[in-house]
Image (cartoon, coloured by chain):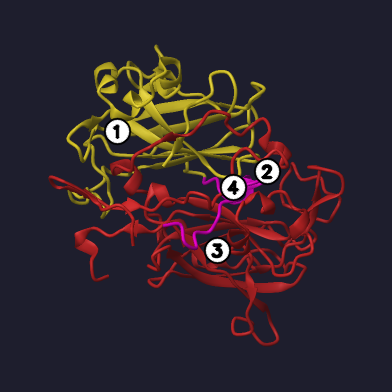
Chain colours: A red, B yellow
């Protein structure tokens, strides 16, 4: 590993998080229409990682109740659509699990409609589906949601624009530097080549990391199909304190 | 080392389904005696308010400490009810609002001192990755002058985009601040690569 050494000045030895250069989409992506008036034009200014950046909110069980990981319950009836299990691990780029960390998700219903006043797609709302979920990773970084496979939906970005089916994911990791909001996609979606948001990620291999895999071992007989998706946050140079983890 | 890192995608227009918390804006419980308010508007490149953004803040406590195991000075015991983290969705007029405590100054590994600040993430439809900025305080003139991050921004007008302005007459002196975020164009806020 060639990452820079931790800052060891006096008693302030700080971990250092690896760069994610080249991984995330450029903010200025004109093919994504909404970016045109919102993406900054000025160069980003380098921010050294000091105390505020290498710490972060450690949000866990106090934000979550046990039923929050099942998006199919909590209403009068069962939602329509294909019931699925979405599960995987949250790791950092050095392979360390990210334990006890809050994950939040939100998504459209099986018809491709969000339970949100701004969504005017003429597909039915489902009174039994809100589309928000939360859970906390376990000691090995594992998470598991039960939900409904979201539908694809049209948007007005360009003529005949449709978003591939996706679930929005929000993760905190253990430091401000690791914060990530992203989207999980489903295998073999024919809309991938046409979607400017998916294709905003410059590296084709990095793009593939947003696509979940069907997994028969996660699939529950007579009940739900399983999709596996691992999430990788920025790793860090270990401080002396952590060697041998 | 960027091997295998999961790429970012936009929060999209419907983040309100999943991300806002009823107590998100309250870094400390309402009614906390020393609480301050930081509020402002998020604007786009046409000067229009952004009604579908999310502003998140992270900061030290008033004693300059973090309730976090990676703080090499030792993990602090947070002041009662202090979460360090704030989260406010913007309203239809583009406004956000955070109720918190003033953070203390922070020692730097190289011996300098960072002025009191909050780290900020802004998420919105149209942003394929979060944008990161910092909130400093207008009544910390001396500390701001010595701050290494502010000093790294040569242009005074750009530097000024990071300073929250004290709002007089509300809550008493030093208790209420305004910090607008301009995503693009004239007066564009300084955003960081962290």
Query: Disc 4 or disc 1, which is closer to the eye?
Result: 4
Name, please, the residue furthest toward the front.
Answer: A2
State which quarter of the image contains the C terminus of chain B.
top left
Q: Chain of mark 4?
A: A
* Residues indicated by labels 4 and 2 sit on the same polypeptide chain: no
Chain of the residue under the numbered disc 3 shown in the image: A
Q: Quickly name the residue at label 2.
A: B13
**Dot 2 alpha-carbon crowd within 10 angstroms: few under 14, some 14 to 19, many 20 or more:** some
Judge by depth and name the residue closer to the eye, B58 or A236. A236
Q: Nearer the viewer, residue A130 or A221?
A: A221
Q: Is residue B155 magenta?
A: no
Mark 4 lies on residue:
A25
Question: Dot 4 lies on which element?
Answer: loop
Q: Are marks 2 and 1 in contact (CB under 8 Å)?
A: no
Give the residues in magenta.
B1-21
Can you see residue A184? yes
* Distance (Cα) linking label 4 and label 3: 30 Å
Label placed on residue A68: 3
Residue at image location 14% in from the left, 47% down from the top = A11
* Mark 1 closeness class: few <14, some 14–19, many ≥20 residues within 10 Å: many
Q: Are marks 4 and 3 on the same chain?
A: yes
Look at the image and tell me whether residue A163 can be seen: no
Same-chain status of marks 4 and 1: no
* B15 in the magenta segment: yes
Q: Which one is in front in this view, the residue at disc 3 or the one at disc 1?
A: 1
State the CA–CA distance, disc 4 to disc 1. Answer: 32 Å
Q: Is residue B176 left or right of residue A7?
A: right
Q: Secondary structure at mark 1?
A: loop
Q: Chain of mark 1?
A: B
């Amino acid at each position: 590993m060639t990452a820079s050494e931790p800052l060891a000045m006096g008693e302030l030895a700080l971990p250092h998080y690896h760069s994610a250069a080249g991984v995330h989409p450029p903010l200025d992506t004109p093919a994504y229409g909404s970016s045109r008036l919102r993406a900054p034009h000025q160069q980003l200014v380098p921010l050294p990682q000091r105390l505020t950046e290498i710490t972060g909110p450690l949000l866990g069980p106090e934000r979550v109740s046990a039923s929050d990981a099942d998006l199919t319950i909590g209403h009068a009836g069962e939602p329509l659509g294909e019931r699925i299990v979405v599960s995987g691990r949250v790791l950092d780029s050095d392979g360390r699990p990210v334990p006890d960390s809050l994950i939040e998700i939100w998504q459209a219903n099986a018809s491709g409609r969000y339970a949100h006043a701004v969504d005017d797609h003429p597909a039915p709302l489902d009174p039994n589906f809100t589309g928000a979920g939360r859970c906390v990773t376990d000691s090995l970084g594992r998470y598991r949601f039960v939900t409904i496979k979201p539908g694809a939906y049209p948007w007005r970005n360009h003529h005949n624009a449709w978003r591939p089916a996706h679930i929005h994911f929000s993760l905190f990791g253990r430091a401000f530097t690791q914060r990530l909001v992203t989207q999980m996609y489903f295998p073999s979606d024919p809309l991938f080549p046409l979607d400017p948001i998916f294709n905003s990620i410059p590296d084709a291999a990095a793009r593939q990391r947003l696509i979940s895999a069907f997994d028969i071992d996660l699939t529950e007989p007579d009940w739900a199909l399983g999709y596996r998706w691992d999430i990788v946050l920025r790793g860090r140079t270990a401080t002396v304190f952590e060697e041998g983890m | 080392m960027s091997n295998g890192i999961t790429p970012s995608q936009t929060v999209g227009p419907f983040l309100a389904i999943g991300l806002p918390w009823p107590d998100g804006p309250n870094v400390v419980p309402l009614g906390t005696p020393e609480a301050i308010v930081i509020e402002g508007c998020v604007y786009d490149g046409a000067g229009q308010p952004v009604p579908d953004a999310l502003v998140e803040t992270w900061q030290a406590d008033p004693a300059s400490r973090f309730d976090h195991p990676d703080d090499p000075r030792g993990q602090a015991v947070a002041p009662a009810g202090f979460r360090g983290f704030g989260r406010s969705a913007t309203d239809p007029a583009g406004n956000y609002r955070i109720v918190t405590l003033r953070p203390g100054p922070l020692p730097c590994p190289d011996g300098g001192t960072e002025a009191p600040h909050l780290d900020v993430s802004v998420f919105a439809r149209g942003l394929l990755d979060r944008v990161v900025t910092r909130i400093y305080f207008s009544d910390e003139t001396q500390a701001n002058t010595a701050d290494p991050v502010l000093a790294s921004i040569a242009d005074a007008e750009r530097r000024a985009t990071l300073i929250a302005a004290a709002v007089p007459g509300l809550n008493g002196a030093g208790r209420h601040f305004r910090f607008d975020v301009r995503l693009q164009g004239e007066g564009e806020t300084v955003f960081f690569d962290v």
